[in-house]
């Protein structure tokens, strides 16, 4: 689906057609972040959207947060929002294609970016994540655990997702116990570590 490009996503943000946007850090990710101790880890948030997770991380003292999104409208807005943190080299905002990103990260936070991609890219997503994670890194976050025809977002099941991840990762996928009311029973939490 080539139409899921900068123009598509920027028009969604310009028109405020962002039904997936909670207006705050998602509860499963907030609780995951709260148990992280090392504030010096390098963190990537791909398909970062309005970056409430980044805002929360920075407020908690994390010092190396990288955001990437394909929407220029969005990344321009984030560069204004995080101007102090960017100047202090605590945050980097990249306008670009996730699949072209290079680097190595200790933690990659997934907030339904996977489900925003055309399902034909899921195998490529798993491979790219395995390349971006540091040796002991973790890919953690939230996926939709229900079918969502017509997307984006595109849903699926834990069994389906495992088929993409098992080649590269030791995978832990479980139902979210701490979703907000409208998403109860519809979200999965993933924690993936590279296979040795």
Image (spheres, rainbow, N blue to C red):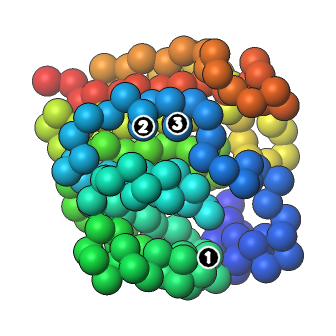
The residue at which mark 1 appears reads as: 74
Q: Position of residue 126 (x, y in %)?
A: 40, 40
Tell me if residue 118 comes above or below residue 176 in the rendering. Answer: below
- In the foreground, 162 or 136: 136
52 displayed left or right of 181: left
Label 2: few (<14), some (14–19) or many (≥20) C-alpha neighbours in 10 Å: some
Mark 3 to mark 2 CA distance (whole Å): 6 Å
**Disc sitting over residue 29 in the figure:** 3
Q: Given contact means CB atoms under 8 Å apart, are the residues at marks 3 and 2 in contact? A: yes
Q: Is residue 135 visible?
A: yes
Q: Position of residue 76 (x, y in %)?
A: 55, 84
Q: Tag 1 or tag 2, which sits nearer the N-term? A: 2
The residue shown at (42%, 17%) is 172
Q: Given contact means CB atoms under 8 Å apart, are the residues at marks 2 and 1 in contact? A: no
Question: Mark 2 or mark 1, which is nearer to you?
Answer: 2
Query: Quarter holding the N terminus?
Result: bottom right
**Disc sitting over residue 177 in the figure:** none
Label 3: few (<14), some (14–19) or many (≥20) C-alpha neighbours in 10 Å: many
The residue shown at (32%, 53%) is 61
Helix or strand or loop: what does disc 2 sit on? helix
Mark 3 to mark 1 CA distance (whole Å): 21 Å
Helix or strand or loop: what does disc 3 sit on? helix
**Disc sitting over residue 33 in the figure:** 2
Mark 2 to mark 1 CA distance (whole Å): 23 Å
Query: Quarter holding the C terminus?
Result: top left
Q: Position of residue 18 (x, y in %)?
A: 79, 60
Snapshot quadrant of residue 136: top left
- In the foreground, 185 or 40: 40
Q: Tag 1 or tag 3, which sits nearer the N-term? A: 3
């Amino acid at each position: 689906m080539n139409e899921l490009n900068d123009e598509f996503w920027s028009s969604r943000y310009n028109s405020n057609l962002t039904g997936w946007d909670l207006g705050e850090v998602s509860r499963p990710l907030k609780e995951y972040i709260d148990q992280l101790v090392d504030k010096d880890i390098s963190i990537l948030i791909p398909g970062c959207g309005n970056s409430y997770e980044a805002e929360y991380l920075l407020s908690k003292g994390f010092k190396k947060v990288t955001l990437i999104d394909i929407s220029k409208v969005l990344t321009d807005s984030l560069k204004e929002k995080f101007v102090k943190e960017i100047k202090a080299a605590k945050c980097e905002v990249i306008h670009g294609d996730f699949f072209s990103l290079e680097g190595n990260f200790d933690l990659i936070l997934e907030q339904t970016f996977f489900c925003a991609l055309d399902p034909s890219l899921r195998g490529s997503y798993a491979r790219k994540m395995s390349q971006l994670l540091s040796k002991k890194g973790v890919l953690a976050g939230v996926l939709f655990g229900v079918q969502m025809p017509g997307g984006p977002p595109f849903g699926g099941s834990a069994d389906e997702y495992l088929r993409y991840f098992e080649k590269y990762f030791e995978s832990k996928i479980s139902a979210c116990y701490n979703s907000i009311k409208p998403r109860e029973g519809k979200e999965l939490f993933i924690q993936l570590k590279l296979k040795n």
